[in-house]
Amino acid sequence: MFRKLILILAVLVTASMTHLVDLRAEDGGEPMVLSVEDAPVDAPSIMATSLHQWLVSRMLNWMPTGRSFFKHAKETREEGKKRYEKIADAMIRVVYDPVERPLFGGKYGRAKTLALVASMSWFESGWRKDVDLGLGSFGIGDQGQSWCMMQILLGRKQLDGKSKNRITLTEDYYTLLTSPRNRVVGWGGEDLVKDRVACFRTGLHLARRSFHGCRNYHVRDRLGIYGSGGCIKNWTPSRIRVKKAQKWLAIEKPPLTDKEAMALLHPPESQKPLPDVPGNKEDPVAMLPRTGSVGFMGSFRTVSFGGPFRIFPEGFSCGMVVEP
């Protein structure tokens, strides 16, 4: 009886845990399809940095490994730590890629962006093994519609094994491809699961879109478009994600400034011109300009939101579904 109760709770938790992001088409810019092969930094060089150690340490603090109750998420602590190291590598590759603009200004702008991406992915998936690798019936959220550790809503898997919708990334934002004729263009959910860099890069582009659209709101409300489809004052899911990152930064200062990290990861001879972040350099939330219109990603209704699930130490999230 107790085992059946645990199974029922696992289903209920999974159904409500995924924070789903509905992608609507964005115009402007040529598609920029980047994957792990495009990253100029070797994995060993990233893992040897104090920045990587700083991130992995925080990940283990937020979500200790080897504790999952889900069948396909079970692993030893050491196996989980090694997987976390690879996840941290992918996050750093994306946030410290010279072609990606950070969400924040100042000498620690990219470190702050990294902290926010880590917080977002913790709330979306808890970096669980089955979600990371797309394993089992709980590996894809929202009944098989939300993919990878950032829980990108691209629809269910079709007969060809690909998600219903696909996405390409423009210079700063993204384009959603919904036509059946675009089945070979861009990334599908299955690609985001196979390539962690693609997963985090997509999540960063969605966050950037939201931060710009909500730029006149308090920084803790700037993930409103990312999660709800519009900017909402005092919206709890946005605030708890930003606040978690801020608390980490208040406790542990990033070990490297952006300039130091970029010089280490991208030697001067291989660097492209870094994108400029306008605004007051002392302003920790200086935002980036954007050309073209800013519109909502779609209409959402909240299904559920709750505190941490004590039975399953995987973290928690705000469950969303898209209204037809």
Image: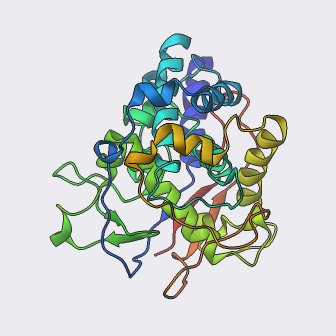
The quarter of the displayed image where residue 133 is located: top left
Left or right position of 110 against 267 = right
Residue 20 to residue 218: above or below: above
Left or right position of 182 against 172 = left
Q: Residue at x 48, y 31 (%)?
A: 46
Residue 253 at what x, y percent from top left? Answer: 77, 38
Residue 211 to residue 62: above or below: below
Q: Residue at x 67, y 44 (%)?
A: 257
Left or right position of 46 against 145 = right
Residue 103 to residue 209: above or below: above
Quadrant the C terminus occupies: bottom left
Question: Is residue 107 among the parts visible in the rendering?
Answer: yes
Q: Residue at x 82, y 67 (%)?
A: 234
Residue 145 at what x, y percent from top left? Answer: 40, 54
Q: Between 299 and 173, which is closer to the camera in this rendering?
A: 173
Q: Between 111 and 91, which is closer to the camera in this rendering?
A: 111
Q: Residue at x 75, y 79 (%)?
A: 216
